[in-house]
Amino acid sequence: MSVCKVTFGSEPKEYEIYDFILKKFYNLRFSNEMKSNFNEKAKNLKRRQREIKKELQSKKFLKKSEEILKLQYEENKRERKVKTKQEKELEKQKKFLLKQEKKKKKHRGR
């Protein structure tokens, strides 16, 4: 399942949504295919009731699309973190090489 988030104004009309889908559907950026854990094997009735009660008490309701959007956000966050770390390391390496070059220029005349 893949999802895409689009924010309309307050209470869009059906014809506005339909028009949007017809005109801009192919420009939307959908998430990568992800599997959700909703399709689980049937469990014992009492166990399911306990799990439902526990979820209701924790107030953690996520629809499939919300769950996938959350997973996509976390994945993008990890990718951004890795990219930023690489950029910082590259910048640090450039500064180090620049300092080394300056040291060589200073001592060249001796």
Image (tube, helix red, strand yellow):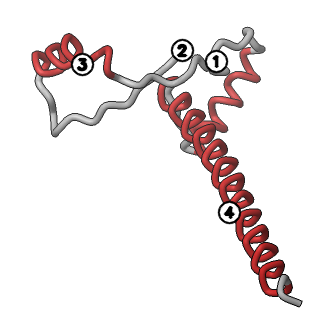
Name the residue rendered at 66%, 55% in the picture.
87
Between discs 2 and 1, the one toward the N terminus = 2
Between discs 1 and 4, the one toward the N terminus = 1
Name the residue rendered at 74%, 9% in the picture.
41
Pick the quarter of the image with the C terminus: bottom right
Left or right of 21, for residue 29:
right
Residue 1 — which label?
A: 2
Between discs 3 and 4, the one toward the N terminus = 3
The amino acid marked with disc number 2 is Met
Q: CA distance from mark 1 to mark 4?
A: 37 Å
Which residue has dot 1 on it?
Answer: 35
- Is disc 4 surrounded by few (<14), some (14 to 19) or many (20+) residues within 10 Å? few
- Name the foreground residue: 6 vs 25: 25
> Does the CB distance between marks 1 and 4 fall below 8 Å?
no
> Does the CB distance between marks 2 and 1 fall below 8 Å?
yes
Q: Give the mark toward the camera: 3 or 4.
A: 4
The amino acid marked with disc number 1 is Lys
Residue 59: where, in percent of width, then height?
Answer: 54, 43
Question: Considering only vertical position in the picture, is 63 above or below 73?
Answer: above
The quadrant in which residue 98 appears is: bottom right
Between discs 3 and 1, the one toward the N terminus = 3
Classify mark 3: helix, strand or loop: helix
Q: Give the mark toward the camera: 3 or 2.
A: 3
- Name the foreground residue: 51 vs 22: 22
Residue 24 — which label?
A: 3
Question: Considering only vertical position in the picture, is 100 above or below 20?
Answer: below
The amino acid marked with disc number 3 is Lys
Classify mark 4: helix, strand or loop: helix
Q: CA distance from mark 2 to mark 1?
A: 6 Å
Residue 24: where, in percent of width, then height?
Answer: 24, 19
